[in-house]
Structures are given as C-alpha cells and as structure tokens.
Amino acid sequence: MSDPPNTENHWIEVLSSPKWVRVLFSGKVIADSRRVLLLREKGAMPVYYFPKEDVIMDALLPSDSTVVSYKGKAHLWSVSVGDKLAEHAVWSYQDPLPDASSLKEYIAFEWDRMDAWFEEGEEVYVHPRDPYKRIDVIHSSRHVRVVVAGETVAETQRPVLLFETALPTRYYIPKVDVRMDLLVPSDTQTRCPYKGLAGYYSVAVGDDLATDIAWHYDFTTPETAKIAGLICFFNERVNALYADGQLLPKPVTKWSR
C-alpha cells in the first residue's frame, strides 16, 4: 500500500441526495436506493455511493485489490450477473480518511462499466448531475459570425446562447445560417448528462479539414430543448468567433488543440 496522496489544495464534499437512483447490469437492477450519497471532489466527476443494504451484494465478488485515493484505501469488487463480469468495477472504504468518513461501508460503481443508470424515471449518462452545475439556454439577437480556415462558415442574428457553469458561452446557430455545404458528418458521438447525445461535424474548406469542430444535438434533455437541431462550433478551435462585431478571445479548455 502506498502513502495517501497529499491533500493540500484538494477538497471533497459528501452530500445526501434526494434522488432515487438505480443501476442496471446485465439486465438486472443491482443497486436501488432513495438514500444515496453524492461525492463531489476537486478535479473529478461526481460519484454516487450506495448503502450496502440497497445493493445486491450477492452480485459482488470481493477481491484482494485496493487503491489509495484522497479518501483512503478503497477495496475493489467485481460484478458478476449471469455470464457477464465487470472486474474491479466497484469499490468501498472500510476505514476512510476523516474528510470522507461518511462513505464508510458505502458502495460505488464505475459508471461506464454498468449498463444503465437512472435518476428517478430518467436514464442519465456519463456521470451524476452536479447540483451545483447550472445551465441557462437563452434566445438572443446578437450578430454571431464563425470563421474556419479563413471562410465564414456560419453567420446569424438569431443564435441560442448556452451558459454552463465553469464553461465558455456556447453559441448555437440554426442550420439555415450555417454553410452546410462545408460541413462533413463525423462518426464521433459523445454524451452529456445535462444535454443528451451529440453528433459531430468536421469543416472542409479547400484542402483544409477541421476535424470534429462542430456538434449538434438532434434530441436533447427537456431542460435544453432550445438547442435541438442547432449547430455549435468550438470557440477554442475555430479561427475566429465574432459577437456583435467583437472578436471573442479563445478560451483554454480540455477541448483546445
């Protein structure tokens, strides 16, 4: 066992969640709880923790493997249902560090190793929704222009602006205001727990191809329905993005290249 990580400048927060949360694996509900804990941690996605009483423990296979984290030493389990096995996809803390003491004997599942997750009656993707994350979707009359490889690929005075906590403002543009003849559909797809399933476009200008530089949601969550069918370009990766004639600075994010 290695020493615990240095906790300086690191923080964790454990919240009681009012949501009813279920986990499906190999066609079986293996966790079903109305009293989950939600862990928020610096630099990490939120994680649900389940009381052992709300987990089908017969589906879990203990192992001798452990992992040391900011919360203490985690003991790993595998999930086995029928012929399906997810090795080391579950963990728990028998003796967590003081800041995580409320997680003692709770069970957490590796999100993408499970088949499906539900908050109340809705399926949720990627990770739990963070209660401190806010999204506002607002119709605007700003004049927005997007330039890629020296070519204006989109220009509109009816964008929909999406404001999301800790992320750049995103400018969603109607397809009729986009040079769709320059857009090349991509096979790339991503999921967002707040917005839904996104498809991507590359932009081809002459011999230049800007890969996966724009995205769209054909179907969204009800909360973000205003962006359905619109196209958004990465502020970080276009040549230029103008709003009301002003060149906007390029943000630096994990999507920058």
Image (cartoon, rainbow, N blue to C red):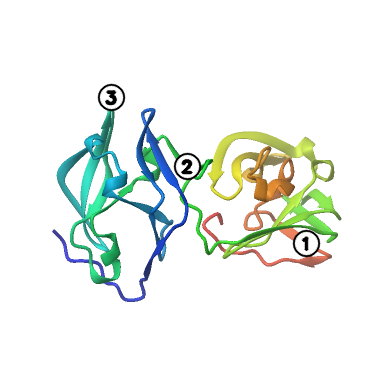
**Residue 70 visible in the current orientation:** no
Residue 197 coordinates in the image, percent (x, y): 59, 40
Q: Amino acid at mark 3?
A: Gly
Q: Residue at x 66, y 34 (%)?
A: 185
Residue 146 coordinates in the image, percent (x, y): 76, 54
Mark sitting earlier along the chain (1/3): 3
Q: Out of 191 and 100, give the one closest to the viewer.
A: 100
Q: Out of 215 and 71, give the one closest to the viewer.
A: 71
Q: Which mark is residue 82?
A: 3
Badge 2: how crowded within 10 Å, few (<14), some, or many (20+)? some
Question: Which quadrant of the figure has residue 87?
Answer: top left
Secondary structure of residue under mark 1:
strand
Q: Residue at x 42, y 42 (%)?
A: 22
Mark toward the viewer: 1 or 3: 3
Q: Residue at x 29, y 70 (%)?
A: 99
Vertical position of residue 2 compared to residue 154: above or below: below
Secondary structure of residue under mark 3:
loop
Residue 257 coordinates in the image, percent (x, y): 55, 54
Quick check: marks 1 and 2 in contact, CB under 8 Å? no
Q: Give the distance between the C-alpha atoms of the residues marked 2 and 3, in whole angstroms.
A: 22 Å
Q: Which mark is residue 118?
A: 2
Badge 3: how crowded within 10 Å, few (<14), some, or many (20+)? few
User: What residue does disc 1 label?
Assistant: 242
Left/right placement of residue 191 relative to residue 139 reads: left
